[in-house]
Amino acid sequence: MVIVIDTREKHPYSFSVPVTKRKLDAGDYSIEGFEMVAAIERKELNDYVQTVIYQKERFGKELAKLAGYRLKAIVVEASMSDILVGRYEGHIPPQSVIGATVGIHLGFGIPIHFCCNRQIAIHFTETLLAKFYERQTGERIKK
């Protein structure tokens, strides 16, 4: 398995498996050979909050593309408690962020995974991609 990292990803994850960089139509991470069916969008907490509140129209177009994929997810480098106590920039009520999160899940069918921090998000992203790859190919990934 080779993970594809979108060329526009500013702070790419480091994985224990081979990676390559190329432009992806949706998401920040995919799998070589599965770029049109598997994608994960990565968000740091402040970026997530700003995007789901102030950039709904633009982000909605990205989510509409992602919604058609077999494997799709948004991985947030924060916990739900970070949102509940407002550990992000700006004066956006936590209820608004949670409402937008629920709206993404219900409206686009895209799960949002709150992974507490960057290291956990990296591990979760690699595991999600690896398990998808194994199910598609029958090949076991050795880390």
Image (tube, helix red, strand yellow):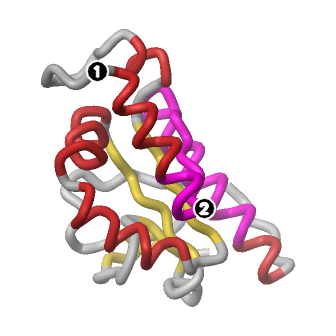
> 67 or 113: nearer the eye?
67
Judged left or right of residue 143, residue 138 is: right
> 83 or 6: nearer the eye?
83
Helix, strand or loop under label 1: loop
* Residue 30 x/y as whole percent: 49, 72
Helix, strand or loop under label 2: loop
Residue at 62% across / 63% down in the picture?
A: 129
Mark 1: amino acid: Pro
Residue at 38% across / 52% down in the picture?
A: 42
* Residue 53 x/y as whole percent: 25, 43
Disc 1: which residue: 93
Quadrant that contains the C terminus: bottom right
Q: Is residue 116 above or below residue 52?
A: above
Q: Which residues are magenta?
A: 104-132
Q: Is residue 54 above or below residue 142?
A: above
Residue found at the very far left of the displayed protein:
90
Earlier-in-chain disc, 2 versus 1: 1
